[in-house]
Image (tube, rainbow, N blue to C red):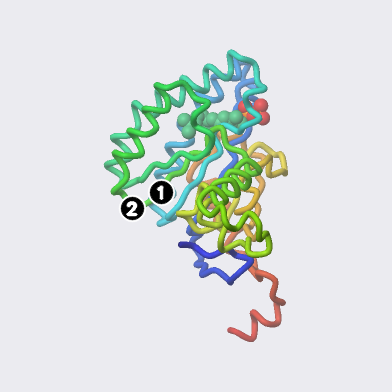
Amino acid sequence: MPISSTRRIPDHTSTPAHIAIIMDGNGRWATQRLLPRTAGHARGVQAVRRAVEACGRKGVRFLTLFAFSSENWRRPQQEVSLLMRLFVQTLEKEVDKLVDQGVRLRVVGQLDAFEPRLQALIHAAEARTAHNSALTLTIAANYGGRWDILQAMHRMLAAHPEIAGQPDVIDEVRLDPYLSMAYAPEPDLFIRTGGEQRISNFLVWQLAYTELYFTDCFWPDFDARELDRAIAWYQGRERRFGRTSAQLNDQG
Ligand code: FPP
């Protein structure tokens, strides 16, 4: 079980073990080309494929992609429907490839809001790839960081009703196993494409000590070279986890 970065200084290597991405800019990519926004999402799927392959080659162990936030239901109905169709089509088409590449697929979020067919496809794809371990690809779908913290609290209290009356015993170690990504270390590197510089209710708990990288590149244009750039930037960061630079230098 990974330990929280605020409790212990995590092991970290020059290749980030866990990269989390907000794939932004699909709509603007399409609008610039006088195409409907939905064409940008379709091209975004190709960028997802490239990112999975590039992360696999580089030895990244966990890649987490924010595909649909709990706030994205506010988009026009036609765009939401297209995104749902894309998820279904992508799951139907890509799972064999994930199996070949040794990729384990996991999907986190409030999945019961999705139509039963999509839920069934998600569960089948997770089951089919469950034995893979080269790279764990997590898709956050109908996900919100605050929802995650609250659902973890609810599940923890349901499992241990006795602690409801003793709030002082609730700490990170108790809550961590109930977070939806308890199986992964916290992200080392967060990437947001599309030029905005915000977290947008993504992995609110888990990004506490993550290095945050923002690029103007629109998601459909994101490729292995852009990923290399982000990783090179990450490798130039000094990860102090609360310590001073002098302390890090003393450690050699
Ligand atoms: C943000 O761009 C992107 C999304 C809300 C959807 C992301 C979905 C994909 C990349 C395709 C499907 C993915 C999978 C995993 C099957 P935006 O629409 O907010 O762009 P904008 O800011 O330019 O309007």
User: Where is 132 relative to 232, above or below?
Assistant: above
Measuring 62% from the left and 40% from the top, which residue is drawn there? Answer: 147
Residue furthest to the bottom in view is: 250
Q: Provide the residue designation for mark 2.
A: 133
Location of residue 105 (image quadrant) = top left
- Which dot marks residue 136? 1
Instruction: Tell me if 117 is positioned left or right of 196 in this view.
Output: left
The numbered dot on residue 112 is: none
Residue 117 pos. (x, y %): 39, 21
* Residue 148 % position (x, y): 59, 44
- The answer to whether 140 is drawn above or below residue 242 in the figure is above
Q: Is residue 158 visible?
A: yes
Residue 194: x and y in percent read 65, 36
Question: In what element is the residue under mark 2?
Answer: loop
x and y percentages locating residue 35 in the rendered image: 59, 16
Of 161 and 152, nearer the camera is 161
Q: Name the residue located 34 percent from the left edge and 27 percent from the top edge.
A: 93
State yes or no: discs 2 and 1 in contact (Cβ < 8 Å).
Answer: yes
Q: For the C terminus, which image quadrant?
A: bottom right
Crowding at dot 1, Cα within 10 Å, few <14 / some 14-19 / many 20+, comes out as many
